[in-house]
Image (tube, grey):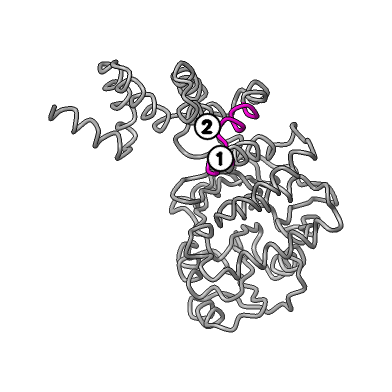
């Protein structure tokens, strides 16, 4: 058996079938249940998974390590019940193993957050060796022989559905994670990454005051060299924008944008903020800069801010300022990426 797909679950009857059905038939499915009271276990058994039970101890790494101990495959792929594997992942895995059979792999995770597509990378694929273990009670990270696991980039993709609003309708999932974050932060109050994750969770749940508090605490930790940090700055900027503090967000982000020249989300947001604050002369340059950078996989990024969304906003700017020819040019650029608002606007212009 080449690959074991390992997941830890609890009360995931709404998601689990989609996840398991996305796994290639030749792969082992390992499902570790941490105390479900719904039909999660029955679904896993019906769909051919190897089911094991683990008593929940408020520690994701402990549960994750138990799950990989149950795997029989030569390689392990980690996924969650609210995810689905890309249709082409089997070929991508074979290609990765052929090129680098001894390395762990970072996988692109595509997530929907409040109708926006976000992309980031996580180390989710690795050889089945005892040297690989997870650490961290929440947002656990893969280690190799006691150190953060080295990895290679890959073309593998997983789709994550867990931040959709209906997932948090009863508040239980948010409450569970908030408890774990705060438990960790009591012992590690200057863990900037965990403060960022806490703020992101509150932002996704539209609790902006709490999100701002977490992001501002993260800002005070001051880890500008970490990959999460510019993403946190952008989320702080959006949080300020949504409470009517666009000028403050603009001041904050303008001071740091040169530190992250490969991150299109910064100039894109600055373009939006310039629209809010009436700095018309800056709008064009910000969106052009985002386009020049292009979309990125280095940071967690909103899809299209370096391509079709920036092109669309430029087109709107040119249309409003009287540059119809340029507007049509950029609407076409955006529409070529199948962006519906751009197609609709081109159709409207054709009728006028």
Quadrant showing the N terminus: bottom right
Residue at point 74% right, 52% down?
142
Q: Which residue is mark 1?
A: 238
Residue 223: image location, x then y, percent: 77, 36
Residue at point 51% right, 30% down?
273
Q: Which residue is mark 2?
A: 269
Tell me the SS state at disc 1: helix
275 above or below 159? above
Which of these two is toward me, 340 or 75?
A: 340
Q: Are marks 1 and 2 in contact (CB under 8 Å)?
A: yes
Q: Earlier in the sequence, mark 1 or mark 2?
A: 1
Is 256 left or right of 23, judged from the image as shown?
right
Check disc 1: other Cα within 10 Å, few if <14, some if 14-19, many if 20+: many
Tell me the SS state at disc 2: helix
226 above or below 262? below
Q: Main secondary structure of the magenta part?
A: helix
Q: Which residues are magenta?
A: 240-253
Q: Residue furthest left?
A: 351
């Amino acid at each position: 058996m080449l690959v074991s797909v390992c997941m830890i679950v609890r009360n995931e009857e709404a998601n689990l079938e989609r996840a398991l059905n996305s796994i290639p038939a030749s792969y082992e499915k390992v499902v570790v249940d941490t105390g479900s009271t719904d039909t999660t276990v029955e679904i896993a058994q019906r769909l051919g998974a190897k089911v094991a039970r683990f008593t929940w101890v408020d520690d994701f790494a402990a549960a994750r390590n138990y799950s990989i101990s149950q795997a029989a495959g030569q390689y392990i792929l980690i996924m969650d019940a609210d995810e689905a594997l890309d249709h082409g992942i089997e070929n991508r895995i074979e290609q990765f193993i052929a090129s680098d059979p001894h390395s762990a792999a970072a996988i692109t995770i595509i997530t929907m957050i409040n109708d926006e597509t976000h992309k980031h990378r996580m180390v989710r694929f690795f050889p089945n060796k005892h040297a690989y273990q997870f650490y961290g009670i929440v947002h656990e990270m893969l280690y190799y022989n006691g150190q953060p696991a080295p990895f290679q980039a890959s073309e593998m993709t997983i789709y994550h559905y867990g931040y959709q609003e209906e997932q948090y309708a009863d508040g239980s999932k948010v409450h569970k994670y908030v408890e774990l974050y705060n438990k960790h932060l009591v012992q590690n109050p200057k863990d900037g990454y965990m403060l960022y994750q806490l703020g992101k969770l509150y932002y996704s749940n539209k609790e902006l005051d709490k999100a701002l508090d977490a992001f501002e605490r993260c800002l005070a930790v001051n880890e500008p060299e970490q990959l999460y940090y510019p993403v946190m700055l952008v989320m702080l900027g959006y949080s300020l924008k949504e409470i009517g503090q666009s000028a403050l967000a603009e001041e904050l982000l303008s001071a740091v944008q040169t530190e992250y020249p490969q991150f299109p989300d910064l100039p894109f947001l600055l373009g939006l903020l310039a629209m809010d604050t009436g700095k018309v002369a800056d709008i064009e340059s910000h969106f052009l800069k985002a386009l020049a950078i292009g979309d990125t996989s280095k940071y967690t990024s909103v899809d299209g801010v370096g391509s079709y969304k920036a092109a669309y906003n430029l087109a709107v700017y040119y249309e409003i300022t009287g540059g119809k020819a340029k507007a049509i040019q950029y609407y076409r650029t955006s529409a070529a990426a199948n962006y519906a608002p751009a197609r609709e606007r081109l159709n409207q212009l054709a009728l006028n």
